[in-house]
Image (cartoon, helix red, strand yellow):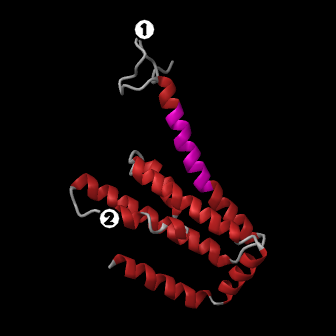
């Protein structure tokens, strides 16, 4: 018999002070956000494999997601150990360019910036911004643009990296 979620009758709180229903809702929200990030990346992968998107779209989202994960983990470590922190502004620069799936997943897994409502609202706006820009790819004009970019992605990659390094200064 497992009593990990047991509580005393008449006592409606767990040792953490949250009701069992609240814990289940929080778990569901966390799983939903993680699932959305993973589902989006799986969709990108499928679209690339079906030749509906150029490879660089997959690489862009994957690379920026990994970079976001690294910055979130570094900032979490710095917060716990009193070291120099990554600015919230910088943590919000990468999601609109495609790093939001990684940021969304890592926020929930390591519980970093997950309770900061102002940050979460800004992050949500960045995710929506990226999704709107991403959906533009599937219009006639967006399709032409994305395939043009694919033809010159090496030059664009260099320019994006230069822009990102400027943001770090």
At x 46%, y 56%, the residue is 122
Left or right: 146 as drawn, with respect to 15: right
Q: Residue at the location (56% across, 91% down)?
A: 155
**In the rendered view, would you say 86 is above or below 165?**
above
Residue at x 32% of width, y 64% of height: 86
Q: Is residue 5 magenta?
A: no
Over which residues does the magenta segment extend? Answer: 25-38
Residue 104, placed above or below residue 46 = above
Q: Position of residue 94 (x, y in %)?
A: 47, 68
- The reply, left or right, for residue 98 in relation to residue 57 is left
Check disc 1 and report its element: helix, strand or loop. Answer: loop
Kindly identify which numbered label has been placed on residue 86: 2
* Residue nearer the viewer, 22 or 4: 22
Query: Residue at horizontal 56%, vertical 87%?
Result: 156
Q: Position of residue 71 (x, y in %)?
A: 39, 64
- Disc 1 designates what residue? 10
- The percent coordinates of residue 159 (x first, y second) are 50, 87
Q: Main secondary structure of the magenta part?
A: helix
């Amino acid at each position: 018999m497992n009593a990990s979620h047991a509580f005393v009758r008449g006592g409606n709180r767990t040792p953490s002070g949250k009701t069992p229903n609240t814990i289940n809702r929080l778990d569901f929200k966390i799983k939903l956000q993680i699932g959305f990030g993973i589902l989006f990346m799986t969709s990108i992968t499928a679209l690339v494999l079906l030749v509906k998107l150029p490879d660089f779209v997959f690489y862009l989202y994957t690379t920026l997601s990994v970079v976001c994960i690294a910055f979130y983990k570094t900032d979490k470590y710095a917060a716990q150990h009193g070291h120099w922190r990554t600015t919230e502004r910088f943590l919000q620069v990468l999601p609109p360019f495609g790093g939001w799936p990684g940021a969304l997943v890592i926020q929930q897994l390591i519980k970093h910036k997950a309770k900061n409502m102002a940050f979460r609202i800004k992050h949500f706006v960045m995710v929506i911004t990226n999704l709107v820009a991403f959906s533009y790819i599937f219009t006639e004009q967006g399709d032409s643009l994305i395939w043009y970019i694919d033809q010159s992605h090496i030059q664009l990659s260099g320019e994006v990296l230069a822009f990102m390094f400027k943001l770090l200064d």
